[in-house]
Amino acid sequence: MALAQRLEIRQGQSLVMTPQLQQAIKLLQLSNIELASYVEQELEKNPLLERDEREHAPDEHDLAAAPKDGEQPAEFSGEDFTKASDIDASHDDMYEADAPPASASQQAAAPLTDWTTVKSGQRFEGDEDSLESTLASEGNLKDHLLQQLTIAALHPEDRMICVAMIDCIDEAGYLRADLDELAERLGAPRDIVGDCVRILQGFDPVGVAARDLKECLALQLKARDRLDPVMQAFLENLELVARRDVAGLCSRCGVDAEDIADMISEIRGLTPKPGLAFGSEPITPVVPDVFVRESVEGGWHIELNSDTLPRLLVNSRYYTKISTNARDKDSKNYLTDCLNNANWLVKSLDQRARTIMKVATEIVRQQDGFLTYGVRHLRPLNLRTIADAISMHESTVSRVTSNKYIATPRGVFELKYFFTAAIQAVNGHEAHSAEAVRDRIREMIENEKRDVLSDDRIVALLTADGVNIARRTVAKYREALRIPSSVERRRLKTGQFPAAAIRPSQALT
C-alpha cells in the first residue's frame, strides 16, 4: 500500500478557554482567605495594580479604574465574561493542576522566623509587643522533643536513632514507624532501637512515642503509679469498654461493676493524644462572605461582606507615563500584558462578587422557611434548582458555594449546607429535607423516657408524619449523629452500665 500526502478541510468544534477566562473561573472557587493571598501576589507582580484604600467613590481626579470595553485593546475587549457559564461545562474544568495560592497562615508565619534568634547586642526598646509575642509563642512537638534530647546524656549513635524516631512521631504524639524496618534502615540492632523508644517515652508530654492507644494510656498510668495488674488487664480489653460489656470486663479483670466504673472514670482523665498540646496549627476563624439580616420592611436583607472583597484600581496614569517612554518592543508588550491582566482581574473580581450575591440571594429565597422557623423547615435543594433559577451552569454554582459562608440570624453556615437530599413523602406530598429528618430523629431519641425507640419504631413514627423512609436510612442517620443503638441505650437506662462510664469511647479517641 503506497503512502501519499493530501490536504483535507474539516469543520469541528472544540472547547477553547483563554487564560483570562481560566483565571476568572478559578477565582470563583477561592475562599476569601485564598483570594486575599492571590490578590497580594498579583499586586507584587503587576506594577499597574494598586489597592483602593479610599472610603469614597472614585472621581475623575483619582486613579482611573478599569477602562471600559470600548477603551481596551481589540483582542481583549472581545472577551465576554458573561458567557463563562456556557463554557463552564463540567466539574472537570476545575484546573486542579494549577498551583494553589499560598494560604494566609503560611504567609503570616514567614516573618516570625526573624524572631527565633536574637543576635547579641540587639535592643528591644520600643518593641515590647514583638518581644511579648516572641515569649508567648510555643514550639511544635518535634522541637519540644529535640530540646529534651539535646540535654539527655546519650551516646551519639543513640541520639541519632532518637532523632530519626522523632521524625516518625505524628502530631498526636504517636510513633508511626515499624521498629524492624527502622532498625534495618538505620543499620542498628533491634534491641538498641527498642531502648531508644523507651528513652523517648520518658520525655514530656507523658505518653509520647506510644505505638497505640493502650500503650499511651499505660505510660500515663505508670507515671501516676496506677498501672497495677487489674488496670493492665483493663487496658487489654478496651474493646469491651466500647461495647459497654460490664460483665465481660468484670470477668476479665476480676473485679465488680463499681471498680470498673472507677477505672473508667480514671481513664477518662487521661490524654489519648498528648502531642496535640504542642504545635497545633492556628485555627483560622470563619469569616462570612455574605450577611443576611431581617429587613424592617419584612423579608431578608442580603449584602456582601465588604471586608472580604479586595478593592483594586488600575493606574492608567502610570501606564500612560511609562508607555510613552518605552523604546523596545519587549517593554511595550510587557506593559500591554500588565494592563490587560490588571483590567481583567478587576473585572473578574467584580463579576465574582456579583455571582456570589446572585447565588446567595436565590438560596435565601429557596430556604426562607429555614431562616424563619428553623432546621425543620429546611427544603431539599440541589445545584440544578439554583442554576436554573439564575441561568447559570451547575458547576458554576458548585464553585461559588465552595468554601463560602453566609451569616444568618440562625448562625454561620457554609453555602453548601443548604443543599440537602430529598426524602420522599407519603401520598406524594412535598419531599422532606434529609437534614430536617435527621434533626427529627435526634429530637425523638433525646425525648425518650422509659421506652427506648428502636429503629423500626422510629420508621413507624416518621411514616405516620408523612416521611417515607427506610430502616437502614434511619440507622445511617443515627450513626452519623453518633447515637448508640436502642440496645445500648436501653443498657444505659436500665443501669446495666455505670453512669460514670457513659460514652467512654469519646475519651479514648
Image (cartoon, rainbow, N blue to C red):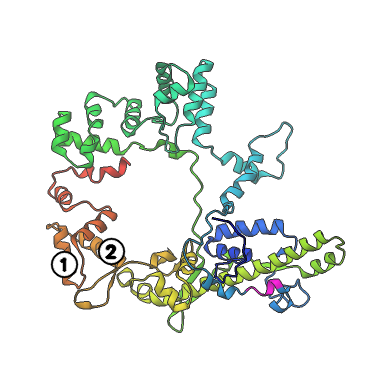
The region drawn magenta spans: 75-79
Q: Main secondary structure of the magenta part?
A: helix
Q: Is residue 452 magenta?
A: no
Q: Which residue is mark 2?
A: 439
Residue at 56 percent across and 65 percent down: it is 25
**Of the pair 359 and 237, the residue shown nearer to us:** 359
Residue at 14 percent across and 66 percent down: it is 460
**Of the pair 488 and 459, the residue shown nearer to us:** 459
Res 39 quadrant in image: bottom right
- Type of amino acid under label 2: Asp
User: Where is 274 relative to 226, above or below?
Assistant: below
Q: CA distance from mark 2 to mark 1?
A: 14 Å
Say if residue 53 shows up in the picture: no
What percent of the width, then of the height, locates residue 112? 63, 43
Secondary structure of the residue carrying tag 1 is helix
What percent of the width, then of the height, locates residue 239? 23, 37
Q: Which residue is mark 1?
A: 461
User: Where is 214 relative to 302, above or below?
Assistant: above
Res 11 quadrant in image: bottom right
User: Where is 202 relative to 366, above or below?
Assistant: above
Residue at 23 percent across and 24 percent down: it is 229
User: Where is 148 relative to 91, above or below?
Assistant: above
Contact, CB < 8 Å: mark 2 with mark 1?
no
Q: Farthest bottom residue?
A: 297
Q: Residues within 10 Å of mark 2 (few under 14, many from 20)?
A: some
